[in-house]
Amino acid sequence: MAADIIFNGKEHETTFYTWMKSIGGNFGDSERVALFYVLSITDDCRNHIDDLYNFNSHCVKPGALHHGWITSSDTRTIRLAFNLFNGKVPTALEESSESSDNLYNKEGEFEYDKSELLGSTPSSIFCDSLAIYFVQGLKLRYQCYFE
């Protein structure tokens, strides 16, 4: 598998394998393989992984797009990575203790940010020079369709 993966430079490759090693190197966990591959594409996401992912709880962090360091490319990167991780648009949701699916805000009101949903469409995400690496992330997540 490693020989088939394309990387956006040595830092991308090194970071990806470091993060995979930190979770035991389970390449059968295609959700995390895709998440770590995509999040390790950009310098900003690599340098701020603690804003995006909790290595102790093994979960992505809601509200990840609210940090000042995030560029438009980082936004697309995070949206795709989170979606590949859990099949949802988690950056559009607010964390809630009242609902297991985080579809409600802290006041118990249903909450989806329309602009976030529109920004999570393929046409919004794949309009970037990083698209070739985003496609690689899709291949890593859905390996059975690309064999």
Image (cartoon, helix red, strand yellow):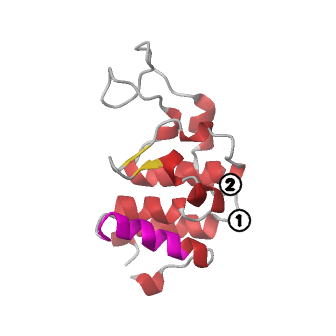
Does the magenta-highlighted stretch encompass residue 45?
A: no
Residue 73 is tagged as 2
**Identity, as a three-letter code, of the amino acid under mark 2:** Ser
> Quarter of the image containing the C terminus?
bottom left
Q: Which residues are magenta?
A: 13-27
41 or 113, which lies in front? Answer: 41
Question: Is label 2 in contact with label 1 (beta carbons under 8 Å)?
Answer: yes
- Quadrant location of residue 41? bottom right
Quarter of the N terminus within the rendering: bottom left
Nearer the observer, 55 or 7: 55
Residue topped by disc 1:
129
Between the C-alphas of marks 2 and 1, the distance is 9 Å
Name the residue furthest bottom: 3
Circle 2 SS class: helix
Q: Position of residue 71 (x, y in %)?
A: 71, 49
From the viewer's perspective, is 17 left or right of 122?
left
**Which of the marked residues, 2 or 1, is nearer the chain's N terminus?**
2
Residue at point 48%, 69% (across, down): 16
Query: Measured along the vertical axis of the image, is residue 81 above or below residue 142?
Result: above
Q: Name the residue: 51% across, 75% down.
A: 14
Neighbour class for label 2 at 10 Å: few (<14), some, many (≥20)?
some
Q: Check residue 52 in the rendering and tell me which mark sits there, or answer none.
A: none
> Within 10 Å of the Cα at label 1, are there few (<14), some (14-19), or many (20+) other Cα atoms?
few
* Residue 85 as seen in the image, left or right of residue 43: left
